[in-house]
């Protein structure tokens, strides 16, 4: 069997599978995972914001300044 015959057989198989999938979807559709459409979870309208506080931001800034100062010392 040469490559062109193999490709032709695979294309036929793909067309057969596509038609079978289309028929199954027409019956009831694929099984869905996750949230159901239109169902809201949690408080509506609230957007989640970043969780870092001003004190945490200040502490992080000081740590990063120390880190970069150490790197500069090592490089010199």
Image: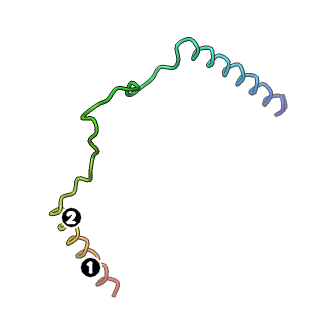
Residue at x-position 20% and y-position 72%: 62
Label 1: few (<14), some or many (≥20) within 10 Å? few
Left or right of 72, for residue 66: left
Residue at x-position 63% and y-position 18%: 22
Residue at x-position 79% and y-position 29%: 6
Mark 1 or 2: in front is 2
**Element at badge 1?**
helix
Q: Is residue 59 above or below residue 33?
A: below
Left or right of 42, for residue 15: right
Q: Is residue 12 above or below residue 51?
A: above
Label 2: few (<14), some or many (≥20) within 10 Å? few
Query: In the rendering, at what x and y percent does residue 44 appear?
Result: 27, 35
Q: List the residue tagged with mark 1.
A: 70
Total marks in image: 2
Left or right of 22, for residue 42: left
Q: List the residue tagged with mark 2.
A: 57
Which is more N-terminal, label 2 or label 1? 2
Q: Nearer the viewer, residue 37 or 22?
A: 37
Q: Quadrant of residue 72?
A: bottom left
**Element at badge 2?**
helix
């Amino acid at each position: 069997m040469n490559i062109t015959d193999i490709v032709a057989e695979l294309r036929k198989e793909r067309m057969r599978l596509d038609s079978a999938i289309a028929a199954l979807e027409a019956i009831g559709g694929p099984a869905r995972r996750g949230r159901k459409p239109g169902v809201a979870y949690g408080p509506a309208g609230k957007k989640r914001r970043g969780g870092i506080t001003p004190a945490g931001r200040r502490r992080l800034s000081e740590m990063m300044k120390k880190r970069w100062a150490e790197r500069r010392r090592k490089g010199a």
